[in-house]
Amino acid sequence: GSGLEIPYNMFSWLSVTLLISLSTFRALACGRLKFHIATIHYGFFLVILLAPLLYVDKLFLDVELFRLIGMAAGFMFLVAIQQESDYSVRRRFIIIIFLSTVIQTALGFVQYYISIEASNYIYISDVFRPFGIFQQVNVFSIYLGVGTLCAIYLWSTSSLSERVLPRVGDR
């Protein structure tokens, strides 16, 4: 939620905004918007998660607003990726996300197993839990979860997985 306010995340948000904008212009130029059925389900659940905005007592709205904005931006990012018609471009984009999580995992291993002194460029937590570059364990774990989903997707769509594991029903 509050990661939107961190100054060094601005480059990431600018990149995401640029991708969403370019995909929107491409969809408008083509005159069609492509959705996967899972995206429609995700959008439905996103609307359900926005239900607290209808409450009369909006006591925690200032705290939750950034999380809701983040969820909406994630949904728009997902739709923007689906507008790319070339499968290889989508696959390369997912590979880039997966490789970035591999780098973060390596940094997490270094932070957990190797003792290094804190400096202006390296932030060491007091509880010695790995956090990558995110400086918060929860954000790090969500990022690694996204990387795991990318790995599962890449593995399931590769031709190697068809040769290694038999299909259901094959004997």
Image: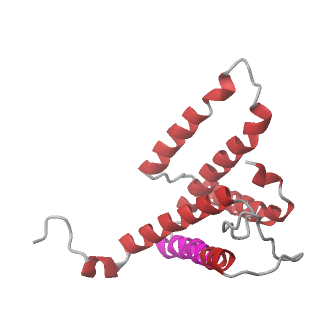
Residue at the image point whose x is 68% and y is 82% from the top: 114
Q: Residue at x 54, y 61 (%)?
A: 145
Residue placed most toward the observer, 78 or 160: 160
Residue 93, horizontal then vertical, whole percent: 57, 72
Q: Is residue 42 above or below residue 151?
A: above
Horizontal relation, residue 156 to residue 57: left or right: left
Q: Magenta span: helix, strand or loop, mainly? A: helix
Q: Nearer the viewer, residue 135 or 82?
A: 135
Labels in figure, total: 0
Decide if residue 112 is in sight here.
Answer: yes
Nearest to the observer: residue 86 or residue 99: 99
Q: On screen, 163 above or below 139?
A: below
Place of residue 122 in the rendered image (x, y in percent of width and height, measured from the top left) = 81, 76
Residue 167, compared with residue 65, is above or below; it is below
Residue most extreme to the top: 56
- Point 57% across, 52% down: residue: 31
Q: What's the image's color scheme? A: secondary structure
| Residue beneath the point at 19% across and 65% down | 168
Asked if one can make out residue 25 in the rendered structure from this viewpoint, the answer is no
Give the residues in magenta.
Answer: 87-103
- Please state, as top left, top right, bottom left or bottom right, where the C terminus lies in the image: bottom left
